Amino acid sequence: MVSVLIIGKGPAGISAGIYAKRSGLDVTIIGKDNGALKKAHLVENYYGFIEPILGNELIENGIKQAIRLGINVIDDEVLSIDYNEDYIVTTKNNTYIAKTIIMATGSPRQTPNIKGLKNFEGKGVSYCAVCDAFFYRGKDVVVLGCCDYAMHEAKELVNVARSVTILTNTAPPQGNVPDDAKIVTKEIAEVAGDEIVEKVIFKDGSCIKTDGVFVAYGVAGSSDFAKKLGVITENNKIVVDDQMRTNLPGLFAAGDCIGGVYQIAKAVNDGSIAGLAASKYIKKLNIIK
Ligand SMILES: Cc1cc2nc3c(=O)[nH]c(=O)nc-3n(C[C@H](O)[C@H](O)[C@H](O)COP(=O)(O)OP(=O)(O)OC[C@H]3O[C@@H](n4cnc5c(N)ncnc54)[C@H](O)[C@@H]3O)c2cc1C
């Protein structure tokens, strides 16, 4: 059992970790990569650096600082979060149980640019297998994606749907393909139907008939986790109060995933507030016990 589990090792996650750790809690941070900053060449608007610093160097320094303070920083990808009094976090390599979660997963994912996809949102296009699988009991569904997250979503569906086909849209499939799922790697042209989704059309003119399209591109992001947990979002951003609390007890969010100004200074500020608020929450839990 972890007291504070932080998802994301960008400025928001690391800052949250530092504050929670220094208030005396055990903290684990799980991050897949260096987030938005790995793409930033030179940063010259962050406090305290006389000369511009490489984005990646800034983030690596933050990670080293966290490790020096005794924070457990783990390279892994979170696939799902469940809530049952405590939080159960499933990653590619492990399962963690935590009293509190701070989501610091960065900017919400963009919807893949596939013709027709947006038109059928809520009419056969879903972004959450756990939430919507039930509606597809005994039906044929497809999952869009190629990586571990797509395989995880497909696994949720195979026990419920009549058939599950993973459409990788030319990418090679990665991770563990569920036994009962099929893989199609053809390039996708369009998601089509009348009132509701009926088929996915490929660039070569062929098509696959389907009752549902589950979108699971890339890595699961804050909005995917939020949908599954029932966390309130607005325009794909997690809604928090001034203490970075979401509507779920013990679940906090910080940084780009809550919107506002997409800047390091703001992410660090959010992280510090979330770290302190999580610490307050844990200490209150211990007093009540
Ligand atoms: C090209 C570019 C240049 C920029 N330049 C500047 C600049 O000069 N100055 C400035 O202030 N800001 C700049 N920014 C913005 C800044 O990088 C972000 O505002 C900041 O990094 C946000 O911090 P964050 O911690 O919220 O998210 P991020 O830094 O994006 O970190 C997100 C973290 O979440 C992890 N994660 C996400 N999903 C999962 C998952 N499923 N499992 C495990 N881990 C996961 C990622 O691996 C990463 O560790 C720039 C951004 C870009 C893209």
Image: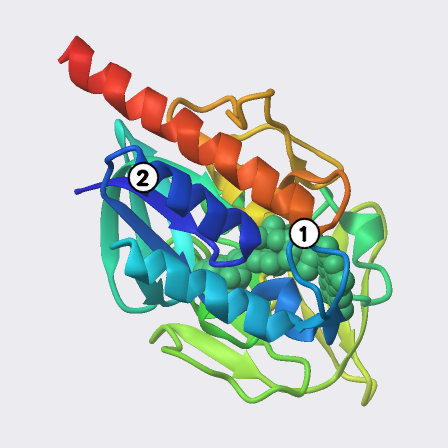
Horizontally, residue 230 falls left or right of residue 113, namely left
- Callout in the foreground (2, 1): 1
Horizontally, residue 29 falls left or right of residue 46, namely left
Quadrant location of residue 279? Answer: top left
Location of mark 2 (residue) = 22
- Secondary-structure class at tag 1: loop
Q: Amino acid at mark 1?
A: Tyr
In the picture, the quarter occupied by the N terminus is top left
Residue depicted at 75% across the width and 38% down the height: 260
The relative height of residue 163 versus residue 288 in the rendered view (above or below) is below
- Residue situated in front as seen by the camera: 276 or 172: 276
Q: Position of residue 33 (x, y in %)?
A: 50, 70
Residue depicted at 35% across the width and 41% down the height: 82
Q: How many marks?
A: 2
Location of mark 1 (residue) = 47
Residue depicted at 47% across the width and 61% down the height: 62
Residue depicted at 36% across the width and 54% down the height: 29
Q: Position of residue 240 (x, y in %)?
A: 59, 26
Residue 139 visible in the displayed image = yes
